[in-house]
Image (cartoon, rainbow, N blue to C red):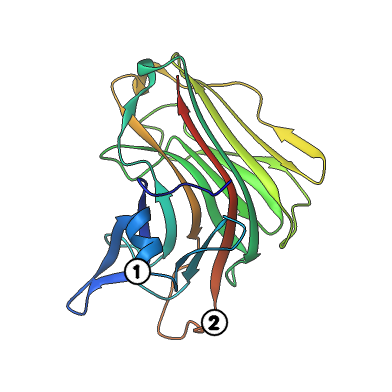
Amino acid sequence: MAVNIDTLIITTPLAKSASNPVALEVTGAQALATLPQVVRRLDNGAVRMTAPTKGASSKSTHRTRCEWKEATYWAMDSANRHFSHQRMVLDQVNSAQKVVIAQMHVKDDDSPAIKVFWNKGKITLGFRRDFDQATPTNSEILANVPLHTPFDITLEVSAAGAAMISATCNGRTGSTGLLQMASTWNSRTFNFHGGVYNQVDFSDSTAPEDASVCVISQLELHHR
C-alpha cells in the first residue's frame, strides 16, 4: 500500500526563494508533485526523502532536513493512545553519521520531548522527562542497524504521558520500556515528526554529495 504523506507538512532542504534562505515547507502532496529532487514516490509506493547536508535550514540553525510532521498539534489527554510507526531504510547518512529519524515535538519550543537518532549504526534516544529539562537523557535502543537495511521505529504515548519507544531490525527488537513524562508537559501540545534531519552543521566547505537519504515504506499515525 502506498505511503500517504499528502496532508503532512514537509520541511525541505530547499530555500523558500532566492531572497529568503529559510527552509521551504509544503504539504506532502505538493512536495510529491513539484519537488522530486527531495521527495519522490517510488514504484512500490514508498516515499524517498533526501536532505543534502548543505542547503536551506530552519530559523538560525545550519542543519538541513527532509522531514514530515503532523499538520495539527494535539494534547496528550486528547486521546488514550498516540502512535507513530515508520518502516524505513537509510540509503545514505551524512559525514557525521548521525541523523534524527523520529520526534515528538512540542509547540512553541525548540527542544522536543522525544528525539530518536540513527547514530553510527545505533538507534538512540534523547528524552526530556520535564518540559524545562535543559539536557535530554540519552540512551541506546538498538545496536547493529546498518544502512540499506529495513528497520521499524515506533513511538507510543498515553494520555497520562507514559511513553515507549521501540526499534526493530533483522528480527531483533529494542525498547525503552515505559518512560513517564512529568506533569510539566500537561499544558503543552505536540506533533510527531519523521524522515531525516541532519545532525551536522553545513559550511562553505561541505561537499555537495554529502547528504542523508531515507525510504519510508510504511507510515502509521493514530490518536485514539
Badge 1 local density, few (<14 within 10 Å), some, or many (20+)? few
The quarter in which the N terminus is drawn is top right
The quarter in which the C terminus is drawn is top left
Give the vertical position of 187 relative to 27 (above or below).
above
Give the vertical position of 169 relative to 183 (above or below).
below
Q: Residue at x 70, y 47 (%)?
A: 151
**Residue 213, image quadrant:** bottom right
Marks 2 and 1, the one that precedes in the sequence: 1
Q: Is residue 32 left or right of residue 212?
A: left
Q: The disc labelled 1 sits on which kind of residue?
A: Thr
Q: Is residue 8 left or right of residue 170?
A: left
Q: Is residue 208 left or right of residue 89?
A: left
Label 1 secondary element? helix
Q: Is residue 55 left or right of residue 220?
A: left
Residue denoted by label 1: 34
Q: Nearer the viewer, residue 194 or 87?
A: 87
Residue 52 position in % (x across, y down): 47, 73
Residue denoted by label 2: 209
Q: Nearer the viewer, residue 68 or 22?
A: 68
